[in-house]
Image: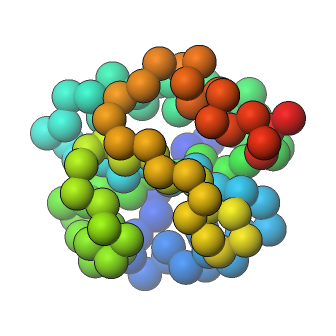
Amino acid sequence: MSDVQSVTDATFADTVLLSEKPVLVDFWAEWCGPCRQIAPVLNEIAATYGDKITVVKMNVDEQPQTAAGLGVIGLPTVAVFNKGEMVKNLVGAKPKSIYLKELADFIG
């Protein structure tokens, strides 16, 4: 799977927490410039490593419940979930090399 899909408060548990493979969640908002800046990087990661990690986006303005419950207060927040648990949490725009380093345990 190489496409970045959107998740909602209603689909988060099934898509992210119950996933068989690790899931990178991009918590973003339309007004967030750094969120737009990292979108192409996350699309590239999804295209290259989609067989090992699922990449999804959650618009926190449209879907505030999950983000609030997870304590997401800064955007963009890129979180990695594995076996239903948040195992990584990166706040702010980062270069692709940082994301790849942080994902190394999951993408090989």
Question: Where does the image place residue 102, in percent across and percent down from the top left?
Answer: 63, 36
Quarter of the image holding residue 61? bottom left
The quadrant the N terminus occupies is top right
Q: Is residue 87 left or right of residue 37?
A: right
As displayed, is residue 10 above or below residue 1? below
- The quadrant of the picture occupied by the C terminus is top right
Q: How is the image coloured?
A: rainbow
- Residue at figure coordinates x 68%, y 38% from the top left: 103
Residue at the (71%, 57%) spot, across then down: 22
Q: Residue 63's x, y, as percent?
A: 28, 68
Say whether residue 5 is visible. Answer: no
Decide: is 50 above or below 93.
below
Query: From what the image shows, is residue 107 above or below residue 62?
Result: above
Instruction: Give the number of marks.
Output: 0
Q: Residue furthest left?
A: 31
Residue at image location 55% in from the left, 44% down from the top = 4
- Is residue 88 in view from this perspective? yes
Q: Is residue 98 left or right of residue 2?
A: left
Which picture quadrant has residue 64?
bottom left
Q: Is residue 83 left or right of residue 92?
A: right
**Could you say where residue 59 lies in the image, as x and y percent from the top left?**
30, 56
- Picture coordinates of residue 13, whole percent (x, y): 55, 79
Looking at the image, which residue is at 60% across and 59% down?
Answer: 87
